[in-house]
Structure formats: structure tokens, C-alpha cells
Amino acid sequence: MNNSSNNRFYFFVPFLIGAAVAAGIFIGSFLGGNGQENPISPFKSSSKSDKLQDAIQYIMHEYVDTLNKDNLEEDAIVSLLEQLDPHSSYIPAQDLKSVSEQLQGNFDGIGVEFNIQRDTIMVVAAITGGPSESLGIQSGDRIISIEGESIAGIGVKNEDVISKLRGERGTKVNITVFRPAGRKKIDYSITRGQIPLYSLEASYMLSPEVGYIKISRFAATTYNEYLKAFNKLKMQGMEKLVLDLRGNPGGYLNAAVDICDEFLSRGNKIVYTEGKARKREDFTATAKGGFEVGGLVVLIDEGSASASEIVSGAVQDNDRGWVIGRRSFGKGLVQEEVRFDDGSAMRLTIARYYTPTGRCIQKPYEEGLEAYYNELNERYKHGEMISGDSITAGDTLAYLTPAGRKVFGGGGIMPDIFIPVDTSGYSPYISEIVSKGIINRFAFDFVDSRREKLKSSYPSALEFSNRFSIEGVLKDFIKFAEKEGVEFRKVEFETSSSIITNQLLALMGRALYGNDGYYAISNKNDKSIKKALELLESNKLVSAQNNPSDKPSF
């Protein structure tokens, strides 16, 4: 790899590592890959005196300064769990509700997605099924006051908006919005309700026969969301499927098992768990699967973890379909939750996940937390993100599928077909506009000022993607970036123009048509998607004779 390639590559490292590490921390501390939809341990904390409690009592009584006992106990528990593994964690009482919401699939509030731009709360969308949608709040509305208090131009932050608009269902909140379309103010009295949190981000047809479904996490509602999307695509002629699990940090084991059951025949192994105090528990497919026959590709990357690795491992180990992308995160520890009387909780690792062939999903963590999360950085440094050939290990980590294909253990799921990180199109110009959020702001402003005209001219995301000309808009974008402090540099702009164009169109698509619009456009130049379509449209079946998975992951 030459110096120029190195420079382009390392521009993306901070963004990718940051996202992946954040996902890893989120997985370990919050989602955990729990084995049950109600992951509460039967264990009850004991009040019997022991060494740890004796030490805390002695410190509280004799220490030179006054201490808060609750804080001392919480710090002790956090420190204790940090000695065990990267994913055992303590969750304070004030955080438990918001953490649980991510997997329960709902929260209480008014139901709007919003951005803060130019010190103003912009409604991106009213969430389907929420009270704001039923009252007619629209994309592009500006929330200018809450309970009679002006919140425009006062430096409002995301957490301020959330604290004012969220609340127990059944309670009311009064807001005033400004609607640019009619240049009028509208008052709403909104009764807060249960707002769905969707874990399925997008579903649409990639081609006349190939459907696409992207799942962002495995929550309590994921399976039902999947069935709804799958049936919609079947009605549109889908015979083959691309399941996108890239960047999916995991979640409930049961949700992953239910998804796998849709793909696998009765009796096929899906996953098993085993721990020192927990006997082996096997999860196998039933006869209910709705897509046991038909081309299947699962997309993964270094941000795919836990339940995502269960699904991709089961598909791979049963020779059911192709796994495309890069080696997954390697989170294969099962957590169980213990609730304390004060409303806090501890999630303790009690078992490991194993794929049907016996591969342990969990990557090593003996060198401590810092080394564990820095491992993603090490993958970049030794070239794994650019070339699958940089991963080397002995055949002791090799396992055979029923069809005789080699798959590899040692941490994470190694894809059948490797897709490197795309480092083309880098320039200092794009680095600057990305870091300052200029593409997002321009796309939102562009749509916001002509929303009705665009929706009438392009009734669907597909029509917008195929017919809308971005060329004239690029000049306006350059001027916008200059006003935001980014000087135009012609050569650098031309180097990055394909990325800028794709992101502008995709973000406009999201503002107009939601996530389906975004992915329908952004996936057009996606190398993993292109490879998936190539495989599915060629009807190439998974077998030992065409096994590209020749390198282990460790």
C-alpha cells in the first residue's frame, strides 16, 4: 500500500474506530446480548455481612473526610465488575429506564424526531403511531415554545428538549410550532403516549427479485418488525434477500433466534450457550420458517456484534447463505440482569455463545479493557480492514460446516467474502465538511424550503433517486460550505465529488421519504450490496467447492 493510500485510509480511521468502539461499549454496558426478553436473575442480594461490606462500613465510620455511602458502594461495584470481563456492567437507577427502552422497543413521549439547527428545533418527522403524527405535526415544523416558554434562539440542547417533551403517558404538554409552508403558528396540546422505537431501519427492493432489510438492533419488537417488512417485500415479488446487520450491536438472544428460525429448516442448530454454573442450552430451528429456501446474503462489519453474530454464524454454519463484509466485533458473552432495591441493576456474564459448529464468538479479553476496545484500532494498523489476507492463524481454529466448508473461530465471524473499507474519495475538503456537519445541514435546508414541490414532482424515493439532477445543486452547496467557513478547493472537491453527491442525495431522500429513501440512494454505490446482488442474481449456491473463506479470524 503506497503512502497516498495510507493517508487516505487513515482519514477514515478515527470515524470508524470511534463508531465501532462506541458500539462495543454500548453492547457491553447496555445491550449485553441477553438470553431472555426479561433478563432478570432469580438471584437475590444478601444483607449478610462480608469483607466488602465490612470495608465500606469501616471507611464510612473512620475515614478522614465525609463520604456518600451510596456513591462509594456504586464505585466499588463498578470496579469489581471491571475485573471480570468487558461486558459485565453496573447500571445506575437513573440510567436503567433509558437503557431498557432500547430493547423494549418503546418509550413515553410526544413522538417526534428532531434536529437542532441554527438554535431552532426542527421536526424531522412525526413518529408513526405516536400522538404527534395523529395531531398532524409535520416534517419541517419548528417547535418555538414549550408550555408557553420560548425555546428558539436561547442555545437549547438535545437533552433540554428531551427532558421537556418526554414524560409519563397520559400527561399533557403544550407546544407551539411555526409552519413555514403557511407561515403560521399553530398551538398543540399533546397527550403523551407510548412511542414505538423501531429496530428495523429500512426495507425495499434492490431489484425485481431481491429484497433488502436492515436491522439496527435486536429488540423485543424486532421479529414482528421483520415479519411485517418481509411480507411487504414478498408482495412486491421478492424471492431473494439481503439482510444488513452492519453496525448492529446486538440485543436480545430470543430476537436473533426467531430471525434465524425464519431461514433454517426444522432441527437445524442456531446457537448454544454454556457457562461454569449454566448447563449447555441449545437453540434449534422449528418448522415455522417463512424463508427456508431462497437466496440469502447477510452483511456484517466490525460493528456487528452479539445477536448479529449469532444470526450470521448460524446462516454460515448451516450453509444457508453467504456472509459478506469484514470480521465482526467478537462479542459472545451472555449477561443476566440482577435488580437491586434502589432501582439500579448489575448485568453479569454467566455464559458464552457458540455457533452451531462450536465456534466461540467472543474475542480474547485477557489483556484488559483498554486493549480489548483498542483491538479494533489494531485491525486497522495491521491492515485487516484493507485485506483479508492480513488475518493469519493456524488450522486449530478451523471448523467444518455440513457441506464441508471451512469456517474459523477465535473471535467474531469471518465473512465468506471479504469487502475492504472503501478509502477512495478522501480529501481534506471532505474531512472538513463532514466534521462540521455541513452536508447534513445543507440537505435539510434544501428539502425544507421546497418540500411540497419535491414531493409532488417525485412521489417516491425511487423516482427521486433516478430523476432528480444534483448537478445544479452542487454549486449552491459549494457556496453554502464557503459561508460555513470551508474554502472551495477544486481538485479536492473533484476527488470527493462522488461521496458528496451520494450523501447529499441520500440525506435529501431521508428528509423526504424516511430511512427507506436514505438507504435506497446510499446503497447504490455500496460495494457489499453490489457483491450481494452479483451472487444472488448469478444463483451461486454456498458449497464446499466455492468456499472463499480461506482465512481464520482471531
Image (cartoon, rainbow, N blue to C red):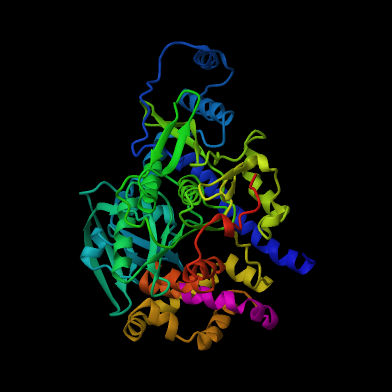
Q: Residue 146: percent from the left, percent from the top?
A: 30, 59
Q: Residue 140: percent from the left, percent from the top?
A: 35, 72
> For residue 492: magenta?
yes
Residue 416 appears in the picture as rendered: no
User: Which image quarter: residue 191?
Assistant: bottom left
If the image is split into quadrants, where does the C terminus sit?
Answer: top right
Magenta residue span: 488-506
Residue at the right extreme? 3
Numbered circles on residues, count: 0
Q: Residue 19: percent from the left, percent from the top?
A: 56, 54
Residue 378 appears in the picture as rendered: yes
Viewer-closest of 452 and 142: 452
User: Which image quarter: residue 385?
Assistant: bottom right
Viewer-closest of 221 and 298: 298
Q: Residue 520: percent from the left, percent from the top?
A: 43, 72
| Residue 369 against residue 450 in the figure, above or below | above
| Residue 485 against residue 222 in the figure, above or below | below
User: Which image quarter: residue 474?
Assistant: bottom right
By secondary structure, the bulk of the magenta-drawn segment is best described as helix
